[in-house]
Image (tube, rainbow, N blue to C red):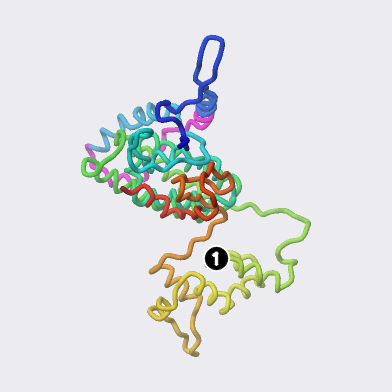
Amino acid sequence: MPFLGQDWRSPGWSWIKTEDGWKRCESWSRELERENNQRNLSHSIILNSDDEEIFSNEEQEYTSKKRKKDHFRNDTNTQCFYREKWIYVHKESTRERHGYCTLGEAFNRLDFSSAIQDVRRFNYVVKLLQLIAKSQLTSLSGVAQKNYFNILDKIVQKVLDDHQNPRLIKDLLQDLSSTLCILVRGVGKSVLVGNSNIWVCRLETVLAWQQQLQNLQMTKQVNDGLTLSDLPLHMLNNILYRFSDGWDIVTLGQVTPTLSALSEDRQLWKRLCQYHFAEKQFCRHLIVSEKGHVEWKLMYFVLEKHYPTREQYGDTLHFCRHCSILFWKDSGHPCTAADPDSCFMPVSPQHFIDLFRF
């Protein structure tokens, strides 16, 4: 049977043949080192007074002396990760492969850095980072953690530049900062990969990102062409019915008085509730107005707090059950099945994490 990935006898690098013999191709490492040098962050960020309360006086004095030095030493190391379009998910050792694929290894090797530039994959990657921040951050290796914050830095800078999806990133940073605060408070009680001072600097960086997003001002677009207000009512209504997130409907309703009236349509919120939640859940949280009408809009936000909403992404990772390969659908993979399409299944962010639970 042919190998479906890198040879287990290879260290994993690309090699080129020269007159002097075989030499390792270092084009990626040079490029990554150049990107890393361009994004040297200032390490003079100081926590707010409320955030400093998580440390005792002795810990704060010790941390202030060493954390910048440790973080600088950690940050100067070249971040090394792959940019592969598919990986083989092996969960046990064989003659050809030793060990198993971990969550950190999959996160390093798959091309998430380029995926955030694709509008179809952006929400998927953000949701995956949010799930990792909530429960899997300490399970990542040191290299995977560095790559995690490197990709997160790219996402934040992208949002600050194009002013799109700030709410998603705010939610992600809020969950991440809560996790980091718990980890820093529990130094010695929880398992941390790397020096504790590095985690303090990471927390400072996240707090700085939150402040930048909080101060983000949306610039008014100057356009003499057709605008949203020029569209007929039935087209505006059709746009609202395309949304699957209630907060997006509320935000769009704040643009013009016409959209505000359309965003209050009871039928619109009823269909949104039916899309995300089951009928049994309606019965448990039924809200009726004084006139006897069901308050579908209010019900949606109440149900959202109790039950997970239905996830919808433009593009996701897929898993081939025949080859045990994880890949982006557009890229494909060298499948050996007679009917490859029947073996593919989409992988949600939660399913991605569950694939690597042993």
* 21 or 308: nearer the viewer: 21
Task: Name the residue located 35 percent from the left edge and 45 percent from the top edge.
Answer: 137
Can the viewer see residue 279 in this picture?
Answer: yes
* 191 or 28: nearer the viewer: 28
Task: Name the residue located 48 percent from the left edge and 30 percent from the top edge.
Answer: 40
* 125 or 334: nearer the viewer: 334
Can the viewer see residue 200 in this picture?
Answer: no
> What x and y, as percent, mark residue 281?
40, 76
> What x and y, as percent, mark residue 184?
29, 43
> What x and y, as percent, mark residue 198?
34, 35
**Amino acid tagged 1:** Ser
Question: In this view, which residue lies farthest toward the top?
Answer: 20
> What x and y, as percent, mark residue 73?
38, 26
Indicate left or right for 227 with 128 as reference.
right
Indicate left or right for 127 with 244 as reference.
left
Dot 1: what SS? Answer: loop
| Residue underneath mark 1 | 244
Bounds of the magenta segment: 35-58
Question: In this view, which residue lies farthest toward the bottom?
Answer: 291
Task: Name the residue located 52 percent from the left edge and 55 percent from the top edge.
Answer: 342
Indicate left or right for 80 with 257 as reference.
left
Magenta-colored stretch includes residue 53: yes
Task: Name the residue located 49 percent from the left edge and 61 percent from the top edge.
Answer: 311
**Quarter assignment of residue 8:** top left
Q: Is residue 88 above or below residue 315?
A: above
Local packing at callout 1 (Cα closer than 10 Å; few below 14, some 14-19, many 20+) is some
Image quadrant in which the N terminus is located = top left
* 96 or 280: nearer the viewer: 96
Indicate left or right for 244 with 195 as reference.
right
